Image (cartoon, rainbow, N blue to C red):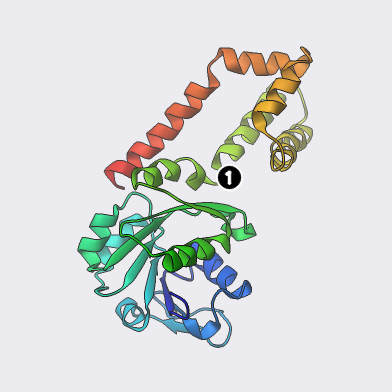
Amino acid sequence: MENKTLGIIGGTGWLGRAIAEALLDRGFLRPEQLLISNRSGVSTFGAGVRLLADNQQLVDLSDIVVLSVRPEQFRELRINARGKRVISLMAGIPAAAISAATGADGVVRAMPNAAVEIGQSFTPWYSAVNLDERDRDWVQRLFECVGASDELPDEDGIDYLSALSGTGPAFPAMLQMALTNQAVAAGIPLAIAQRAAQGVVVGGGQMLANRDPRQMIESLMAYRGVTAAALQSMADQDIESIVGRAIQAGAEVARRGL
């Protein structure tokens, strides 16, 4: 796939644009290798990047097509991508359905998250066709431009991870909000509660970037103090089952299609 042209349908949306900018900034693509389409045909991309208002024209001019649109918009695309490789960033749309609707020769499904904006997304991907080593490396390097990435052995994994890593900051945001609300209910002023909760989520997340979470929990439990009491309470309420049910609920939506 080296030196191929890449077209992004929906490339001026938040996800498509973040990926496009990262590919250019990292030198993965030259501007003349990138095509972007949206309904208006208007964008602020720099010189060399081609902007199109016609999705089929983008497909015709591209070697590889990225679908960066909402799942509910997919039915309205009506593109002919025969002879093309299509990379879908849509949750809940199976590779077989994409291939049947577009005629694509091969479909890759991937699930980035909102952290593409800061180059910290985890992007799992799955190819519905066998890729040779060069093409597999190309897809892997593409998504590494916006963070970490792994190839999955089966498509069901994409649906599951759509509800796990695909949620991006949603779970930490809910935890931070819960911590804030509980602190306020305990009489802590709102501004202080917000800063304290943010420190737990953001500061703790940064520490975990280089630490094993199980070892951290075990070392904190060993002190048998305040933190251990809080952790034991969560364990007694089976926090793993609560999280597991939440992820399964999201995964089921992805599996049955949006």
Residue at the image position 76 percent from the left and 12 percent from the top: 224
Quarter residue 45 falls in: bottom right
Residue 186 visible here: no
69 on left or right of 168: left
Which amino acid type corresponds to the residue marked 1 in the rendered image?
A: Pro
Which picture quadrant has residue 68?
A: bottom left
257 vs 48: above or below: above
Task: Identify which residue is drawn at 69% across, 37% down.
Answer: 201
Q: Which residue is mark 1?
A: 169
Element at badge 1?
loop
Q: Quadrant of the N terminus?
A: bottom left
The residue at the far front in this view is 133
- The location of residue 240, given as percent across then percent down, is 52, 23
Quadrant in which residue 217 is drawn: top right
Position in image of residue 107 (x %, y %): 32, 62
Q: Position of residue 41 (x, y in %)?
A: 43, 80
